[in-house]
Amino acid sequence: MKIPIASDHAGYAAKCVVLQILKDLRVDVDDLGTHSEDSVDYPEYAVQVAQRIDQGDAELGILICGSGQGVCMTANKYSGVRAALVQDAQTAALTRQHNNSNILCLPGRSLEHEPELLKNILKSWLETPFEGGRHERRVQKISSLTSSHS
């Protein structure tokens, strides 16, 4: 599985840390940018990952911006996306287990100097399966909202 990842300039430093962690975990990634701390508009990068998920070209993706909010809001405009803003490993697991999140959104400014926390978040999110059952019904209700308002 190849995971697309992207960030804006404010998430770039954290993305560099995440890329090294993913490499150490032997996770194959497709780095869609940005590739520096030069100012860019986060929607342009969030859209690249969200489209791959929405079109079925990737199962999971990762987005990073300064707060994580901008990329999360942008990605969730796509009907096939369930992007989740995460700041700890427990929340990361719950977004997979209960919400079947398919894009992990990270706040770069608060996590760029926290490599162990980032590693725990990534491992938790990548290793936790969707529980299904009663949660499937809830995820379907979320999906029905975007399809009925498209």
Image: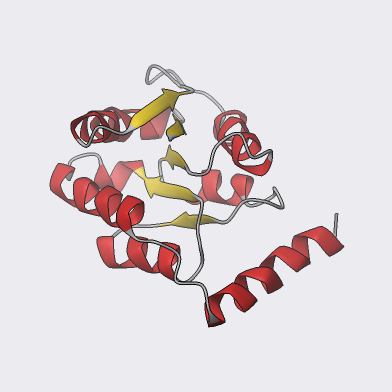
Q: Nearer the viewer, residue 3 or 150?
A: 3
Query: Which residue is at 26% across, 61% downward?
Result: 89
Judge whether 134 appears above or below 75 on screen: below
Query: Which residue is at 53% across, 79% downward?
Result: 133
Farthest-out residue, bottom:
134
Farthest-out residue, left:
116
Judge whether 54 appears above or below 84 on screen: above
Judge whether 139 appears above or below 113 on screen: below
Q: Nearer the viewer, residue 86 or 51?
A: 51
Query: Which residue is at 38% across, 17% downward?
Result: 36
Residue 101 spot, x, y in % from top left? 50, 58
Query: Which residue is at 61% across, 29% downward?
Result: 44
The answer to whether 111 appears left or right of 35 in the picture is left
Q: Quadrant of residue 35?
A: top left
Residue 129 spot, x, y in % from top left? 39, 61
Residue 81 spot, x, y in % from top left? 62, 51
